[in-house]
Amino acid sequence: MLVGALLLAALAATPPARGGTFVSGRLVEEMGSTEILGGGDYLFVKFGEDAVFGVLWGNVTNPNHIHIVVLKARYLGVAEVVDANGRRIAENVPVKYWTLHAVKLLDLVEVRDLDGDNLGNYTRGFDGANFTSFAETDEVPKMVSLGTTWTRGPIQTAGDDTGRSWSFNLTAENLPYIGVNNAVTPRGDNVLNHVGFAFHLTAALEQVDNVTVPSWKITIDTAQLRPAVLGAERLGNVTRSGTVARYSLKWDQNITGWDFEAPGTRRLLLEFAAIVGNLIPPTAANWLNDRFVRDRNETGRARYETAGRNETVDNRTGNVSAPRPLRSPYVEFGGDWTRIGRFTWVTASTVDGTPAPLYAQILAGRGLVARGPYGGAFVGFVILGALSFAEGDEILHDPTVTTDAIAELLPVPTGNEGVFLAVAVVVAIVLVGVAAIVLSRKKKR
């Protein structure tokens, strides 16, 4: 476990392009209830402990937001490990650490677009886990929290060994308005009549023989009670066989019956919080801290394009001085060398049956550091963003979240594979730690 944690210094393996053998029959569907991420019901598609993807939503027992969840191992290479005298301790060590990426559908927020830029000009407070208060430039009269009880429709499944799919609806009715900085002025029937999300999850599992990963020589001091890292030397690249999991989750959203204020141009923003948290294993947390990860630029960041340049948001950003309008119809998440996930959308919506432009913005990036109950640590960040829709009674749109993950990494057989070490942290421990970071302080059952 020590060796695996040391290789946070390494670069990430890159999943190859398609061209292997599909083995999607090995994917496992898991459904149930949980208290992680605030609690509720979930549908996850899993491959072992290295790739988990799916949706979590609030139920009657635990009203909650909808979360699109990715839990994936990021392989950082293989290593030869030696002591201070050059004696080999282990070789051909495939090393990984786990990353949690979640897109949380936060709130619907009405703004009066005073300057006509099609954005919501405001900032929000942050208490270390949640975005809280509003400071307005544009008028923000009211909002609706999407932390509620969701009703799930039937699940339709399909697929074969080349890929599998799951489709289902989540709906909520008659959601109350919340005054932002003033009381709500009654309008219409004074509730949001309907919010619906139709999810389409697809997954494929592929065996490949051309995964290229960096190799490292790690020197450690074994004379100390807790071995210390003396150095890391890049040796080049090696080729491994493995299994790649590819996931995509598209959803069609329907927002019907919002009672807009008058007069003035109004817009409705769907706020989302996108979270990235990296697990530092329990046995390493005493000596491997967030600085170790940060110095190697693998804590992660969000990348996007504005009209003038490419920009990033990470755990150091804080509130931006003004909302950043996105030219790119996506936000990408990753480190210097690793890929975590991609949140994409089409740039047109349908409002009352008529096509209407959609705009997107970034509002903030905040750091997250939390210690798990077993001594491990999570290090990462959360960004606050929003999709901005024109005023109307019925608003339709369809975003997507995609990711891929190397779900197994094996050496090319040589007859002398040596000693293999890995970070042995089960998914259950990972998710307990995530609950401590993200939006929930509950204990795991």
Image: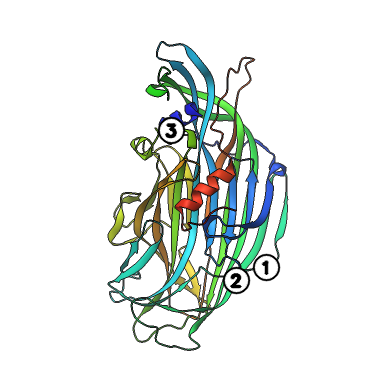
The residue positioned 48% from the left and 80% from the top of the image is 258
Tell me, for residue 335, which label it has, or none.
Answer: none
Residue 141 at what x, y percent from top left?
A: 36, 79
Rendering quarter of residue 329: bottom left
**Label 3 belongs to which residue?**
8
Q: Does residue 164 appear in this view?
A: no
Mark 2–mark 1 contact, CB under 8 Å? yes
Please name the amino acid that badge 3 sits on: Leu
Q: Does residue 201 appear in this view?
A: yes
SS for tag 1? loop
The vertical placement of 77 against 30, above or below, is above
Tell me, for residue 171, which label it has, or none.
Answer: 2
Please name the amino acid that badge 1 sits on: Gly
The vertical placement of 269 against 375, above or below, is below
Q: CA distance from mark 1 to mark 3?
A: 42 Å
Q: CA distance from mark 3 to mark 2?
A: 41 Å
Camera-nearest residue between 360 and 74: 74
The residue positioned 60% from the left and 18% from the top of the image is 417
Tell whether 165 sits left or right of 144: right
SS for tag 3? helix
Nearest-to-viewer mark from 1 and 3: 3
The residue positioned 53% from the left and 18% from the top of the image is 91
Residue 50 at what x, y percent from top left?
A: 58, 40
Q: CA distance from mark 2 to mark 1?
A: 8 Å
Residue 57 at what x, y percent from top left?
A: 58, 62
Tell me, for residue 153, which label it has, or none.
Answer: 1
Of callouts 1 and 3, the N-terminal one: 3
Mark 3–mark 2 contact, CB under 8 Å? no
